[in-house]
Image (tube, coloured by chain):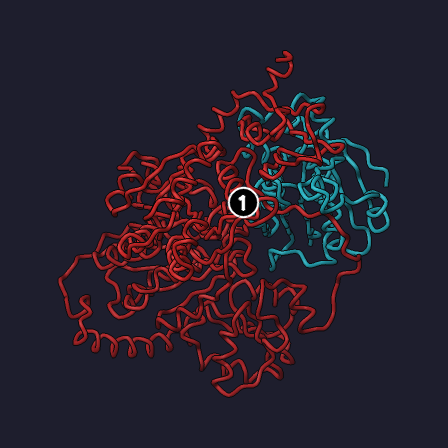
Chain colours: A red, B cyan
Amino acid sequence: MKLLLSGNEAIARGAWEASCHVAAAYPGTPSTEILENIAFYKEIKAEWAPNEKVAFEAMLGAAIGGARALVAMKHVGLNVAADPLMTSAYVGVNGGLVIISADDPGMHSSQNEQDNRVFAKFAKIPLFEPSDSQEAYEFVKLAFEISEKYDTPVIVRSTTRISHAKGIVDVGERVELPVKEYVKDPQKYTMIPAFARKRHEILEKRLVELKKLSNSIEINRIEPGDTKIGIVTSGISYQYAREVFPDATVLKLGMPFPFPDELFKKFASTVDTIYVVEELEPFLEDHVRILGYSVIGKDKIPITGELNPQIVRKALKGESLEKIPPQKAVKRPPALCPGCPHLGIFFELKKKRINVMGDIGCYTLAVLPPLESIDTTVDMGFSVSSVHGFNLARGEKSAKKSVAVIGDSTFIHSGITGLIDIVYNKGFSTVIILDNHTTAMTGHQPHPATGRTIKGEPTKKIDFVELARAIGVEDIHVVDPHDLKAVRKTLKSALNYPGPSVIITDRPCVLLPDEWKKLQKNPKKVVDPEMCQGDKCGNCFRLGCPAIVWKDGKAFIDPLLCVGCDLCIQTCPFDAIHPEDEYEKGI
Amino acid sequence: MKKGYNVIVSGVGGQGIILASELLALAAMEAGYDVKKSEVHGMSQRGGDVVSHVRFSQKVYSPLIEQGTCDLILAFEKAEALRYLHYLKPENGVVIMNDLEIIPLPVTAGQDTYPQNIEETIKKYANLVVVDAIGKANELGNSRVANTIMLGVASKFFDIPEDIWIKVITNRVPKKTVEINKKAFELGRKIELDF
């Protein structure tokens, strides 16, 4: 049966057919849809984990317990899971363990563009790199087999253009395998130094075997062609190379690590000039150069950003097919949504010129005009730990002008330990948990404070107030971020409190279906142009609500975008904004 | 061997670009082509520009269209037609453009200007079809089928039989809207082109 599937859907399908029993992930673009699609299959126990480390450890535990397990994450998620990753190579598996790393070259929705192929080499774990949806589907199935056969986790590395591109996949059916027997074996699974030393030797021997496999496995192949140019490539870069050099000889590597030295030498002996076409790091190129070959690679092809056929053509052929000059269009920067619960808090933080240690989520967009209130963003949880360090550096006075802002899901992911650090070390920082009741940025996944699982079942729900209290925070506030007066009062009180403070801004994301329905009942807001002071004021505009636009020098609320909240009313010093029903009646 | 096509579907977030490109890709698959389609989701939320590349041919490698090789741009908004004009092949490229301007925040804030003379610029390089898709959709009684009207216009350029389009629309759009979408598609397909 042929289906049009995204790479992420294909990975889910492959896992299902390969009798994957359990899967876990933390949402992160471009990997999120892998687990969402796996959750549709009733045969697989699928779980959102609080973060990637927990997801990884849970799945390694499942694999040791004999199940076929899959864990999926975005590239930076593997940093969080790097600790269990490194030692998982030592202990190996029982049931197969497949790790999906979805990288984001070009940073469509990420804070960096690290190349996680390097992790495979670092951790000494075999690496598969599909180049389209069909291969994503096939390679996941193959990865489970290799994992069990060689007693090793396997990394399948996708990128945004694999995960989010769709292609035709010829699918099959699930072949049900039983969960394997578990036999207690501390020498294999308990990494005290004495046992770990032996396991390291086993790991090195395994790598030698995997290198033999890499030279013979059919997903590493020479595609014969014109012998003037030979191209070494893997992943999505294969498609771009083929687009530009349809007739060249190509060494297509579906399993680029361990690198197939012998296969490469055979390929190299048949071609005159070798090009290495790869995105980001010179991963293949370094291997080839170590073998003593001179090649054309990163000296021509950019090391930064995402590739495409045009870049490859310009770099290697010095030509371009583009004949029509690019035109100036118009900027459409991403923005927080109309009525977003984050608008009010950042509006107030900016007004008070507070230093804001930011985090990863929709609210990172508050760095852009007109809100422009965020000072820093590095990784998940950074806001909480770093505001403590910032205040350590700058003293108690700084604490009255500095806050951490972190989303509910991100706080569970990595913010809790930072808060413990503040309390334990007698800090005085203020942490604002922006609780919008969901993981909004990646498309509304439930998390442990929503009280729902990935399958929609009810479960225990974390109470942030109780959690903060248990950690030792004494100054805890809950505030509706759409009540600006209350927000101001709360901020003042928390910032001046001589100890750690937690503010929970409690309001659901406007795009959550229940909230959306509720908002539809609210009257839209309208601006009375006679009352509006326009350019002389501009206060409502500083909210950054996309529904508020400028028309003939006055504020105008686009009725198609307005969700009917009353944030803008609270910002207007001239009483020029009203609910449409009252305005029409002349109230 | 049937001719292959490279198509860009562009517009503003929330306009239904992904569904339209999905329908095109599914129709091409049903018609026996190899198909790839690519777009990016994530940070570009509502209000950001959205583009989908759809390629169908005997064999498709790259999911991304190379600049200078696009056959047709299906734009749901005028500036979003202009943004991808340089992707068109230099000869006989086609732009099907919704007669709609969506003004973004930086323009209302006075930090950017909305492009002028879009139609004249496009006509310098390509064959242009301007469709009042929202007006026509309103005549059918639902402004949301504007996309399907646009897709109906575009469908005339491809070697895909009408019954395949109808089948794909029937299977893919929400059940309640199948009839109106079929009507919208046929309305688009009947629009006369003057080149």
Question: Horizontal and vertical percent for residue A123?
Answer: 35, 71
Tell me residue B161's x, y (percent): 67, 39
Q: Indicate the quadrant where residue B99 lies.
A: top right
**Residue B131 screen position, x and y as percent:** 77, 34
Q: Where is residue A97 in the image (x, y as percent from the top left)?
A: 31, 60
At horizontal 37% and vertical 51% (from top left) the residue drawn is: A429
| Residue A368 appears left or right of A319 | left
* Residue found 50% across the figure and 45% down from its top: A362
Dot 1 falls on a residue whose secondary structure is helix
Mark 1 crowdedness (10 Å alpha carbons): few <14, some 14-19, many ≥20: many
Q: Is residue A214 left or right of residue B133?
A: left
Q: Can residue A73 be seen in this view?
A: no
Please give the count of numbered marks on the rendered protein: 1
In which chain is the residue bearing label 1? A
Name of the residue lying farthest toward the front? A397
Q: In which quarter of the image is residue B65?
A: bottom right
Q: Quadrant of residue A446?
A: top left
> Who is closer to the viewer here, A240 or A213?
A240
Q: Which residue is drawn at 57% across and 44% down?
A: A371
In this orientation, does residue A235 appear? Answer: yes
In which quadrant of the rendered image does the C terminus of chain A lie?
Answer: top right
Q: Which of A371 and B171 is in front in this view?
A: A371
Q: Amino acid type of disc 1?
A: Lys
Quick one: A341 or A280, which is closer to the camera?
A: A341
* Residue that numbered label 1 is attached to: A350
Q: Is residue A485 above or below residue A386?
A: above
Pick the residue in front: A321 or A228: A321
Residue sitting at the far bottom: A292
